[in-house]
Image: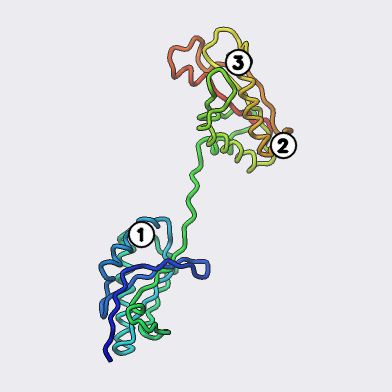
Amino acid sequence: MKLKIVVLFFLVSLKSLGQKQVEVFFDFNKDFPNPTSILTLNEWIAKNKEIEITKLLGFCDSIDTKNYNKHLAERRIESVRELLEKSGLKFSKNLDKIAYGKDFKQSKVQAENRRVTIFYSEIAPKIVESEFTRQMRNSKVGETVKLPNIYFFNNSARIVPKSETSLYDLLCAMQENPKLKIEIQGHICCQMVNDVANISTARARAIYNYLLRNKIDRKRMKFVGYGVLRPIHKIPEQNQAEEDENRRVEILIVEK
């Protein structure tokens, strides 16, 4: 019977039992993936760096003996494992490697049987704690923590959108510690007289309102504006850096 050799040059991505899988195909009697599968595998690896390989299954077509095909499947598994290892992917400590050879339900298309199936799980991204979050967690009652990267439009209490990350960090700190009570303190710069327009209070209130909109109990927080009464640097400031440090919002820890 004349065999029709169909060469598969692709990977198939599926979901199985909570895990994902890809399949790498081989040419007849070869233990290294065919060239086009290698290219596609490299593209897949480039898009899936944050994964953990959990299982490698090796398969062969029905040609040749059971023993020969089992050893061929083992070599195919090893060649794929080496490719994945060289690419820097992570492996489970309990990595399963099973060589089925030809001992499985075969496809009528022999080329579909010559494969290694890679099972993997996505690794949850590592959360990097911000310096502000660390300071809020370690601070004691009576200490103040500067809320970083908070920007307002000129002479107003409107918060610039790029401040969202810092606001969210403050919100998370309040959510993670239900006993935490704070005072939001607003400060301005550059004026020899106190805050005539009361901008520092309005800015502190804007942050208070953000927390309130996100369901933080008003009993856990209050706000106050100090204008230029508590500068870090003497006014008038000598440079832009001093102005930036005087123009700030601080969080006073009232209760933990």
Measure the alpha-carbon separation of dots 3 and 2: 26 Å
- From the viewer's side, name the closer residue of 9 and 50: 9
The residue at 58%/14% (across/down) is 228
Task: For residue 138, say whether it is visible.
Answer: no
Q: Position of residue 219 (x, y in %)?
A: 74, 33
Mark 1 lies on residue: 45
Residue 160: which numbered mark, if any? none
* Outermost residue toward the top in this view: 192
Q: Amino acid at mark 2?
A: Asp
Dot 1: few (<14), some (14–19), or many (≥20) neighbours within 10 Å?
some
Quarter that holds the C terminus: top right
Residue 193: percent from left, percent from top:
58, 7
Disc number placed over residue 217 in the picture, else none: 2
Q: CA distance from mark 1 to mark 2?
A: 46 Å
Q: Is residue 168 left or right of residue 103?
A: right
Residue drawn at the location 60% of the way across and 13% of the way down = 229
Q: Which residue is mark 3?
A: 227
- Amino acid carrying mark 3 in the image: Gly
Which residue is at a point 63% across and 43% down the rendered structure image? 176
**Residue 147 higher or lower than 107, as above or below:** above
Quick check: 150 above or below 241?
below
